[in-house]
Every structure is written in structure tokens, then in C-alpha cells.
Image (spheres, rainbow, N blue to C red):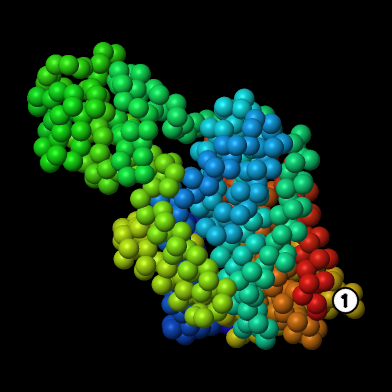
Amino acid sequence: MDPVAATLVILVLAVVAFVSNRVPIGVVAIGVALALFFTGVLTLPEALAGFGDPTVLFIAALFVVSESLDATGVTAWAGQLVIGRAGTRRTTLTLVITLLVAGLTALISINGAVAALLPLVVVVAARAGIAASKLLMPLAFAASAGSLLLLTGTPVNILVSQFAADGGGRPFGFFEFALAGIPVVIGTVVILLLGGRLLPDRTGALMPVDLVRHVRLLRQQYSLTLDTGTLLGPTTGVTEVVVAPRSPLIGVHVCVGMTTSDGDLVVLGARRGDEPLKDTEFQVQAGDALLLQGTWDDLVRRTSGTGVLAVDDPAQLRRSVPLGRGAKRAIGILLAMVILLATGLVPPAVAALLAACALVVSRTVTATQAYHAVSWTTIVLIAGMIPLSTAFITTGTADLVANGMLSLLGDAGPHVALLALCGLTLVLGQLISNTATVLIVAPIAIAVAQALDLSVQPFMMALTVVGAAAFLTPIATPANLMVMEPAGYRFSDYWRLGLPLAVFFLAVAVLYVPLIWPF
């Protein structure tokens, strides 16, 4: 089979598989790499080269850095510090939330920032008497805008920087994205503030734990006289567990105030049904509720067995406590990585890998946490789709598509060519991952730039900007989907506010970007 034809057929099948949403993304990506090998388009080392690509390793390491900030309570601290002082007006809350999530996204990724702030935003909305649906879509959309502020904001930034270097240009600097990102964030915030009427008023199906109310409720139900601050802290906490059927604890004699057999946890309180058990020794029965106190590590370890069922996962509660154990180390390592990335003393992948290793060695995160923090779906997607970009270039497919597009456009000029590429990216980005979209369109954009004898820099930056405009559907980005259930959104809710934002991003990509990065 002709290599060009084979590459195009594989591309079409991959897009269909992505859009159908019936085949796991990782399977599609690996299938693309294998198909390129079996059709003879690429050799086996070329087809699997994406799994050893420095860009992929860079992105994987950034997930670990993001996990350290989330797990140690740095993100919770920033959220409570800022949002907690924003008052109860929707416009003020929207302004504060959008600016905060944009800043966090630049450092810890879109999904990490949204996941960390989502519970806090829902709680704040409830306290202010505002529907969460009025704040959560701005949270997700502003995160996409904030991803354009720094190189680390999204995998797309890292990919287009590498594409620019490979396409005859240069990699983008760590802070260079902010030249486009700052205007985008400002414009996004303005649209979100003015577009309040475009947001639905819905009731969400999920309510996260409000730590203040949670502690107050525990003190009331277990008749505790302890000060609230002693229950949840940076190193120690409490968790409520229910004794499971056939638990080895059944029949054990317990009294409030005693420690567990290992001496690592204290029984602060107990309940049987609606009645608290205190001041007397009792024999544990299935269904009894126990309130345990200890270090967070011990709580996580002791509640992960089969003897008890945790009412609230201590690992999740721990993330909501500001500035927990290891927070200073996480911040210090993050700053060191940023300095390395900004100065270019070492390659980006090396800087991120050094940071990830330092976090594990310093016990800021465990090795298990580090492995679980990596979004392997994203890694496999990028590693599997990189060979398709390679095939587009080596087989001449990108040149063929670019020449066909330019023949249709005639002498319309570079702005029209850029508009066509950005329009294609915008449409695909609503249906499939924006990462996969950029991996598909970037080689074509490079071929167009080279055919017109233009710089690749404006084309790559424009793809980055419009690639972030995934606002029209809940499936466009994980962040959009993440806020859907807590806010009670419907599929059709997104395009109302998403459409003016998408048009704004497209205008920035086509009209503003070439002013900063000339053709």
C-alpha cells in the first residue's frame, strides 16, 4: 500500500475511533503506532519511538510535580486563602476563582487545578447561596485559558514547542507563552463575567465535604469536647469508619480513649445506631461506627484493610487540609524546576525528571503516589500519536495535504491559511483530545509554513491558542467533564458560553499571534 494512502487511512480510522468514544483512547493510540508498522510506513523503532520521546517523559514527570502540590495541601491552601476572602457576590467570586485557577493551571496542569479547586468552589457556592452551576463552568473554562501562561500549562505547549524546533524554527521559552496567554486570560475573564446569563441555574448531584461543617458534625455526633483544630491538621487527622461484617474487630472490647493494638491510632468516639458509646467499655459489633485519630499515613494504612469501611476516605480529606506535611519541600522543588526550565540550564525533560525524583527521595510523595499520579492515558495517547506525526512528515503526507489546502485558498495570504488551520483545529478539538488534534494538524501547519516560506512560530503558537478553545462540549476536555455532575450540567449547556469564548480564542490565534510572532 502506498505510504501516503496508508497514513491517511490510518488517520481517518483513528479520528473515527476517537469520535465514536467506543474504543479506549490508549488502545486507539497504540493501534495507530502498530498500524504504521504493519503497513510498512514506519519501522518498529520509529513506530514505538514515542514511548521514549523526551517530551513524553517531561509530561509524565509534571504529573508527579502536580500531585505533590495537591497531596501536600498547597493547592488547598492557595484556594482557601484566596477564595475564602472573596465574599458572596457571584461576580467577585467568579473573578477570584477564574484568576486563581488560571494561575494554578500554568504550574500544575488543567486537570490538576480543576480537580483541586472543584470541591472548594462547590462548598463556597453553597455558603454564598449561589448555584454551583454558576461557578463551575467558569472554573473549567478559565483553566483552559490559564494553560497558555507557561510552558508547563498543558502537554500541547510542550508538543508545539518541540514541533517548532523540528520544523526549522526554535522552541518557545518557558515564559514566552504568556505573551499570548495573558491577553487570552484577561479576555476570558471578561467574557465569563459578562456571560453570567448564559450559565444555567442547575442543582448538582454531588456535594463534596465541607471541612468546617464536617468537623462540627463529628464533634456533635460523637459528643466531643476537643477543640476543632486538634481534629484536622497538617500531620494528623481523624476518620470515621464502620465495622464491616466478618471484621476481625467484632467481639473486641473497646472503650473511648484507648489506642489500637499497634498504638498508632486513638479511638476518639463510638456510636451504635443513633446512640453514642462513651464512658463504658463495649464489645464491638458489625455496623458500629468508630472515630479514629492518628497521623494521616496511619489512617490511610489502617482503613485500607477489609475490617472497616471508611465513611470519608482519609487520603481525600488529607488533600483538603492546607499546607500539610511536605508542603514546603513541594514548593521548594517546584521553584527549583521552574528556575531550571526558565534558564535552560538543562533540557526540559531533565528538569522535570529531577524534580519528580527529588519529590520521591525527599518523601514528599511516595513512589506509589508518583506512579498513580501519572495520567497514563495521556502518556499513551501522546506516545502512540507521535509516530503518526512522524509519518505525516517522512511520507510527504503533510506536504500533500498542505499543497492541496493552499491550492484551494489560492493567493489569499498567510492569515487565511492560518485561519483554515485554526478552524480545523477548533472543530476537531471539540470531538477528540486537543493533544491528539495538535499532533495531527501540526505537521500540516509546518508544511504550509514551509511552502509559503514563512516562520513556523506563529503557526505553532496559533495552534496552541486555538487548541485550548475546547469549550463547546463536555467531552472536549476532562476538565469540562469533571464539572458536569457536580454542577448538574446538560450536554447542551456548554456551547452557549463556550461559543463566544471559542470565537475569541480563534480571533486571538489568527489576528493577535502574528503580531507577536511575525510570519
Q: Is residue 454 left or right of residue 352?
A: right
Q: Is residue 117 left or right of residue 375?
A: right
Picture layout, residue 63 above or below residue 246: below
Say which quarter of the image contains residue 398: bottom right
Q: Nearer the viewer, residue 19 or 426?
A: 426
Q: Which image quarter holds the N terminus?
A: bottom right
Which residue carries the number 1 mark? 413
Look at the image and tell me whether residue 6 can be seen. Answer: no
Give SS at disc 1. loop
Q: Nearer the viewer, residue 463 or 29?
A: 463
Say which quarter of the image contains residue 318: top left
Q: Nearer the viewer, residue 254 or 428?
A: 254
Q: Residue furthest top?
A: 275
How many marks do you count on the picture? 1
Q: Is residue 446 left or right of residue 153?
A: right
Look at the image and tell me whether residue 266 can be seen. Answer: yes
Identified at 9% across, 24% down, the residue is 253
Picture layout, residue 210 above or below residue 404: above
Q: Which image quarter holds the C terminus?
A: bottom right
Identified at 45% across, 29% down, the residue is 212
Picture layout, residue 426 above or below residue 353: above
Identified at 21% across, 17% down, the residue is 277
Identified at 63% across, 79% down, the residue is 171
- Residue 485: give x, y in percent of width and height: 54, 37
Say which quarter of the image contains residue 428: bottom right
Residue type for callout 1: Gly
- Residue 7: give x, y in percent of width and height: 59, 76
- Residue 182: give x, y in percent of width and height: 71, 59
- Residue 333: give x, y in percent of width and height: 44, 64
